[in-house]
């Protein structure tokens, strides 16, 4: 997690207990898995209603790039520095605002930005992960949720599902 964000258990408590909207408590869970030999890479996961909803890791981004044809899979290069160097360069060229999958480091960057910003700024941030944290935040009220539901077309599909889930949990199912 890095020293700036503290321990994962503390961060999870912050996200799931301290800042999570009451209507979402017990429905949202975050997880972090770290594997030996992964060069400090982690897999962050978001569970909704007990089911894995989204992962944030290098592997999900790599799979996304292959699936969308942004990069071709070359099994001879997958484990080489040449492949990963090119992959990292491509990742830098396509900002988070234009992708549907994100790395663990992007998750941490968005979490740090969310923690250091006011809720209004997080709700309108260019980073969809930061907006996700804000949508699930207890400080986001029904008027703000209504504004977000009016802009669903501007949100990534994975995020608008979270927005609609939160709106429904707040009793806004007339949307």
Image (cartoon, rainbow, N blue to C red):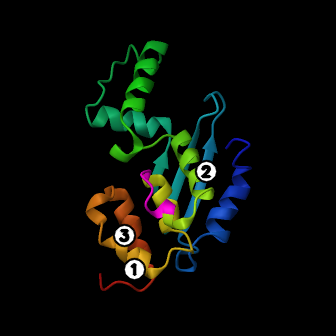
Nearest to N terminus: mark 3 or mark 1: 3
Residue tagged 1: 168
Residue 40 placement (x, y as % from top left): 64, 33
The relative height of residue 174 versus residue 32 in the rendered view (above or below) is: below
Measure how far apart labels 3 and 1 are at the Cα level. Answer: 13 Å
**Residue at (61, 49) in percent of width and height:** 32
* Element class at badge 3: helix
Measure how far apart labels 1 and 2 are at the Cα level. Answer: 28 Å
Write down the quadrant of residue 151 in the picture.
Answer: bottom left
Q: Residues within 10 Å of mark 3 (few under 14, many from 20)?
A: many
Residue 97 placement (x, y as % from top left): 37, 47
Measure how far apart labels 2 and 3 are at the Cα level. Answer: 22 Å
* The magenta stretch spans residue 123: yes
**Residue at (53, 80) in percent of width and height:** 23
Which stretch did the figure color magenta?
121-127
Tell me if label 3 and label 1 are in contact, CB under 8 Å: no
**Residue at (53, 47) in percent of width and height:** 107
Q: Is residue 73 left or right of residue 121?
A: left
Q: Which mark is residue 148?
A: 3
Nearest to N terminus: mark 2 or mark 3: 2
* Residue nearer the viewer, 51 or 22: 22
Q: Nearer the viewer, mark 1 or mark 2?
A: 2
Q: Is residue 79 left or right of residue 26?
A: left
Residue 113 placement (x, y as % from top left): 57, 52
Residue tagged 2: 112
* Element class at badge 1: helix
* The magenta stretch spans residue 88: no
User: Where's the C terminus, which quadrant?
Assistant: bottom left
Tell me if label 2 and label 3 are in contact, CB under 8 Å: no
The relative height of residue 18 versus residue 168 in the rendered view (above or below) is: above
Residue 133 placement (x, y as % from top left): 52, 61
């Amino acid at each position: 997690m890095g020293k700036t964000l503290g321990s994962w258990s503390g961060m999870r408590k912050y996200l799931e207990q301290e800042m999570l909207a009451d209507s979402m408590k017990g429905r949202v869970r975050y997880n972090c898995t770290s594997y030996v030999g992964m060069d400090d890479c982690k897999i962050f996961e978001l569970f909704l209603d007990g089911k894995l909803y989204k992962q944030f890791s290098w592997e999900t981004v790599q799979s996304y790039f292959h699936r969308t044809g942004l990069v071709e899979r070359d099994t001879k290069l997958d484990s080489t520095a040449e492949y990963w160097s090119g992959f990292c360069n491509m990742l830098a060229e396509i900002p988070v605002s234009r992708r549907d999958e994100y790395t663990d480091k992007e998750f941490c960057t968005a979490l740090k930005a969310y923690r250091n910003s006011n809720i209004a700024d997080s709700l309108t941030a260019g980073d969809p992960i930061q907006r996700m944290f804000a949508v699930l935040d207890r400080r986001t009220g029904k008027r703000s949720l209504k504004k977000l539901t009016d802009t669903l077309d501007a949100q990534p599909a994975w995020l608008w599902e979270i927005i609609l889930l939160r709106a429904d949990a707040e009793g806004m199912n007339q949307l």
